[in-house]
Image (cartoon, grey):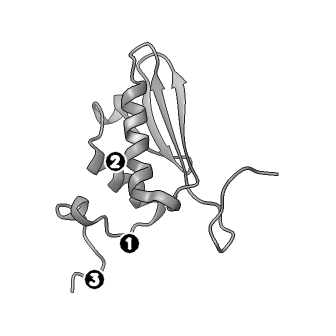
């Protein structure tokens, strides 16, 4: 039996995985990003998992889709960008309010 949480329709809720480098002491950064995602998406996420790693790794994936890689994307995302990236995977039409004032294009601007 899977431990994945599901919504009222029985669909599995999205899962976010943040892998951080313990050698670089990025646990606090990973925890802060997890907190930001949980605050914004509340009951729309099934889980946010922190995974310790080494070698300068800092990656964030949502439903097995890599949304951020520190080496590929150059550093760390700010909270607004991270929320937009996760939103784009789990619910592209969702309005993030103030986080979308710049850059996000709604399907129907009217």
- Image disc number at residue 108: 3
Q: Is residue 61 above or below residue 72?
A: below
Question: Could you tell me if the residues under marks 2 and 1 are in contact, i.e. CB atoms within 8 Å?
Answer: no
Q: CA distance from mark 2 to mark 1?
A: 16 Å
Assess disc 3: are there few (<14), some (14-19) or many (≥20) residues with their C-alpha within 10 Å of its C-alpha: few
- Image disc number at residue 52: none
Residue 50 image point, x, y percent: 52, 34
Q: Secondary structure at mark 2?
A: helix
Q: Secondary structure at mark 1?
A: loop
> At x 45% / y 40%, what residue is drawn?
60
- Image disc number at residue 93: 1
Looking at the image, is mark 2 or mark 1 earlier in the sequence? 2
Total marks drawn? 3
Return the residue at label 2. Answer: 82
Q: Is residue 21 above or below residue 68?
A: above
12 displayed left or right of 83: right
Q: CA distance from mark 2 to mark 3?
A: 23 Å
């Amino acid at each position: 039996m899977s431990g994945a949480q599901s919504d009222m329709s029985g669909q599995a809720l999205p899962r976010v995985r943040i892998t951080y480098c313990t050698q670089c002491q990025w646990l606090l950064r990973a925890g802060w990003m997890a907190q930001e995602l949980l605050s914004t998406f509340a009951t729309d996420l099934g889980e946010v998992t922190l995974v310790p790693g080494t070698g300068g790794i800092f990656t964030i994936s949502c439903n097995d889709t890599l949304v951020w890689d520190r080496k590929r994307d150059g550093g760390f995302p700010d909270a607004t960008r991270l929320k937009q990236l996760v939103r784009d995977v789990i619910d592209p039409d969702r309005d993030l309010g103030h986080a979308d004032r710049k850059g996000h294009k709604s399907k129907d601007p009217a």
